[in-house]
Amino acid sequence: MSEYLTNDATRAERAARLKVIIDKLAAGATPSAVKKEFHDLIKGADAAEVADLEQSLIEGGLPVEEVQRLCDVHADVFKAGLERGERAERMPGHPVHTYLAENKEARKRARSLRLAALGGSLEAVANAVRGLKPIITHFERKENQLFPYLERKGFTGPSKVMWGKHDEIRAVFRELDAATGSAGSKAYRAKARDLARRIRAMIFMEEKILLPNALKRLSDAEWAEVRRGEDAIGFSWVKPGAEWDPALVAPAGGGAYARFNAAVAAASAVPGASATQNSSSAAASIGPDTPIPLSTGALPLKVLDAVLKSLPVDVSFVGADDAVMYYSDSPHRVFPRSPAIIGRAVQNCHPPKSVHIVEQIVEAFKRKEKDKADFWIQMGDRFIVISYKPIYDADGTYLGTLEMSGDATDVRALEGQRRLLDW
C-alpha cells in the first residue's frame, strides 16, 4: 500500500511522540530545538490527524496553552522548508503533492490490472478494477476544485479536454461493472486493459501538462484556497500531509471565501457609506442568530442554513448572470461540490458533452419558454432525480435557476399506504 496510508498503530505512535514534543516545550525547549522531531512526525501524517491528536491530548487533560506551543513549531517547519529552497508542491499537504501521491498509487494499481487482465482469473481482474475505482474521486477534485481556479486565469482548454477524458474513463468503469460475471473473458479482459491504458495516459497528461501549467499560473495563496476546499470532495487512497499548511499562507485577495464575504458585504451595503464602513457593518450585523426576513416569517441565519442542508434534495442556485451563487453543503450530497464552485460559470460546472444542454435550459428559462426541466438517471443501485426550475421575482424578472438533485430510490419503491407512526 501507499506510504501515505496510515493505521491505528502509527496513529498511537504519533500521539506518543507528539506528547513527548509537547513535554519538551513545556519544559522550556525552543520551537527550533524540537523542529526536526515535529517535522519527522508530521511527514507521514495528514493535517486532520495532527489536529485530532492535539484534541485527544487536550481531552486527556493536557492544558490548551501547552498544545498551542505547537503552532510556533509548525510555522517554523513550514518556513524552514521554503527557505532552504524546497518547492512547495513537494511538501506533503500541497494539492499537487497529493495529486502526485495519488498518481503513484494509481500507476501501481493500473499495472496490477493490466497483469491480471493478461493472465489472472476473471475474479482477479474484477478485484483490480474495483481497486482502481477511487481514481474517480481524484477526477472529481480536479473538476470541482482545481479547474475553477484555472478558469479564472483563462486556462480552460486543457481542463475541458481532461474532463472529457475523465468521462470516457468513467464510461469504461460502468461497462466493466455491467459486464462482470456475464461477459466473455476475452472481451472483458480487453476492456480492462483499455481501462489501465486510459488511466496511464491520463496520469501522463496530468503530470506533463495540467499540473506544470497550474503551478505556473496559481499563487501560493490560490493553492491555499484550493487546499481548503479539497476535503469537501475527498481523496483517492491517500490523505494530504501536514507539512505544507494552507493556514500559514498569506490569504488571497480573491478566491471562493473572499468572494462569499464580498457578496455578504454587498448585500448589506448602506448607501453613501464607505466600503470599509459597509464591510464592518455587514460583519457586525449578519451573524448566526441574525433573523433573515422571508415572505412568510423569518429564520435565524444558522437555522436557515441548517434547514437547507437538511432537505432531502441537494439545492444549488445559479444567478441571472449564469454564475453559481449557492449550494447546500449537506452530508448526503448526490454530486460533489466544493467552495470553488461559488462564482463559477454554470457552463463550466458540467462535462463538455452536456454543456449545450445546460445552455439550452438556461436560455429557455430566461425567455420564459419553459418552467422546468427534469432528468432521472441510474447511479449504481440508486435512482437519482435532477430537477431545474427558473426563479422569477414578483415582476417576472428572471433571477436565476434552481437545481435540485435527490435520491428517489426509496420513494420509488413505496407501495400501499402508511398512516401510523412506525418508530
Image: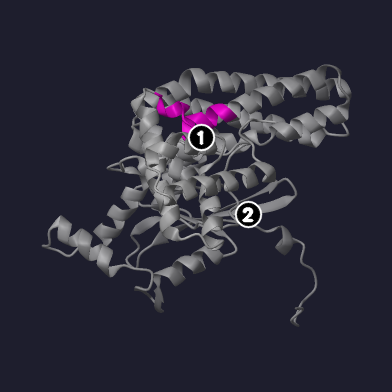
Tell me how far mark 1 sits from mark 2, CA to CA: 25 Å
Residue 100 belongs to magenta span:
yes
Q: Nearer the viewer, residue 309 or 81?
A: 81
Residue 339 location (% of width, % of height): 43, 48
- Report the residue at 58% width, 60% height from top: 313
Vertical comparison of 314 with 172: above or below: below
Q: Which residue is mark 1?
A: 142
Quadrant including the C terminus: bottom right
Residue 363 belongs to magenta span:
no
- Report the residue at 40% width, 26% height from top: 215
Q: Nearer the viewer, residue 126 or 37?
A: 37
Residue 90 location (% of width, % of height): 47, 26
- Indicate the secondary structure of the residue bearing disc 1: helix
Q: Left or right? Give the position of 115 relative to 364.
A: right
Residue 87 location (% of width, % of height): 40, 24
Determine the image quadrant of residue 126.
Answer: top right
- Indicate the secondary structure of the residue bearing disc 2: strand
Dot label at residue 385: 2
For the magenta stretch, what is the residue range?
A: 86-101
Q: Left or right? Give the position of 273 relative to 368.
A: left
